[in-house]
């Protein structure tokens, strides 16, 4: 009887331990229930994505829009800061689920990626020093000039195509970060910078810069970028549509662009 009793006690202890091991903790349950989406961005492109003065907290139009979309869809948004020249490669490598970083929809990009409903329009423009001798009010005036732009951006492509089509001579300097281009412009190492009008408006708050030309037609459109076949496309489109209708998107845009 003692042996049987000991065996029964042993079995009960084992069952108790197994039961305890299988029961998830509260934190594990919360983690399991939590839906996380990773958003890639280059956090050096105001007013769309940049660090606050503490240099650790991300803010900006794209940041706030991502948070608003996440709230609509029940996702916790996790931001991944990445260099611009790796931003599409890192999406291919699944380091994040989507890109929100002032991404322009282009035919070339549409061949490889999917895009959400556009949420803002943008134009190419030229910025120079307010005191510079050369104040280009037309792209043709860039003949023999040194012009800075963001590497592998639509601005770089626009400048390159214009130079070829109009047979002018321009020294094009590509930058990994736009801040460096504007610093070189201020230090007279460039005659002009070509960039997004939405970006230029922020830099031109500094009176030492002035926007001298802006594209008048064929605006670019910014959108969320996804891998082909992403499950998030329809969800994001519904959320963006709702944010447009309830005025939240306009509030975010007005906060950063005053439009």
Image (cartoon, helix red, strand yellow):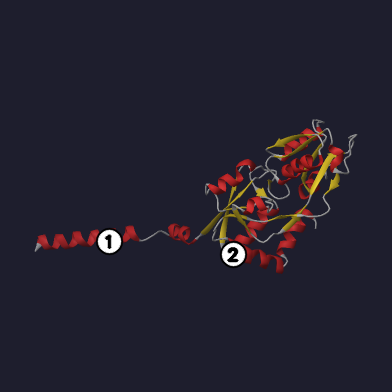
Which quarter of the image is occupied by the N terminus?
A: bottom left
Q: Is residue 28 visible?
A: yes
Q: CA distance from mark 2 to mark 1?
A: 46 Å
Residue identifier under label 2: 234
Give the class, few, some or many, for how many residues have Cα within 10 Å of label 1's Cα (few <14, many ≥20): few
Q: How many marks?
A: 2
Spot occupied by residue 243 in the image (x, y as percentages of width and height)? 68, 65
Q: Specify which label sits upstream in the sequence, 2 or 1.
A: 1
User: Could you say which quadrant of the image residue 257 lies in?
Assistant: bottom right
Which residue is at the front of the view, 231 or 247? 231
- Describe residue 111's horizontal placement relative to residue 124 as left or right: left
Q: Residue at x 63, y 61 (%)?
A: 69
Proximity of marks 2 and 1: CB atoms separated by less than 8 Å: no
Which residue is at the front of the view, 173 or 201? 173
Rendered view: 213 above or below 191: below
Residue identifier under label 1: 16
Which of label 2 and label 1 is nearer to you? 2
- Describe residue 47's horizontal placement relative to residue 127 as left or right: left
């Amino acid at each position: 009887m003692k042996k049987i009793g000991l065996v029964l006690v042993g079995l009960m202890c084992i069952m108790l331990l197994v039961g305890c091991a299988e029961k998830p903790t509260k934190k594990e349950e919360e983690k399991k229930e939590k839906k996380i989406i990773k958003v890639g961005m280059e956090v050096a492109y105001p007013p769309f994505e940049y660090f606050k003065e503490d240099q650790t907290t991300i803010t900006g139009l794209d940041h706030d829009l991502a948070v608003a979309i996440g709230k609509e869809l029940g996702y916790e948004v996790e931001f991944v800061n990445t260099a611009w020249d790796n931003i599409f490669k890192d999406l291919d490598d699944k380091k994040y689920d989507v890109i929100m970083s002032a991404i322009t929809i282009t035919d070339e990009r549409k061949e490889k990626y999917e895009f959400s409903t556009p949420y803002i329009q943008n134009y190419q423009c030229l910025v120079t020093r307010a005191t510079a001798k050369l104040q280009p009010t037309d792209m043709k005036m860039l003949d023999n000039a040194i012009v800075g732009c963001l590497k592998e951006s639509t601005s770089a492509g626009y400048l390159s195509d214009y130079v070829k089509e109009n047979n002018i001579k321009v020294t094009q300097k590509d930058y990994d970060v736009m801040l460096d281009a504007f610093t070189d412009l201020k230090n007279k190492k460039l005659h002009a910078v070509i960039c997004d009008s939405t970006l230029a408006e922020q830099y031109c708050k500094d009176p030492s810069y002035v926007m001298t030309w802006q594209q008048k037609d064929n605006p670019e459109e910014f959108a969320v970028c996804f891998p082909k076949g992403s499950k998030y496309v329809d969800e994001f489109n519904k959320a963006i549509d709702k944010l447009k209708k309830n005025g939240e998107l306009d509030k975010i845009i007005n906060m950063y662009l005053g439009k």
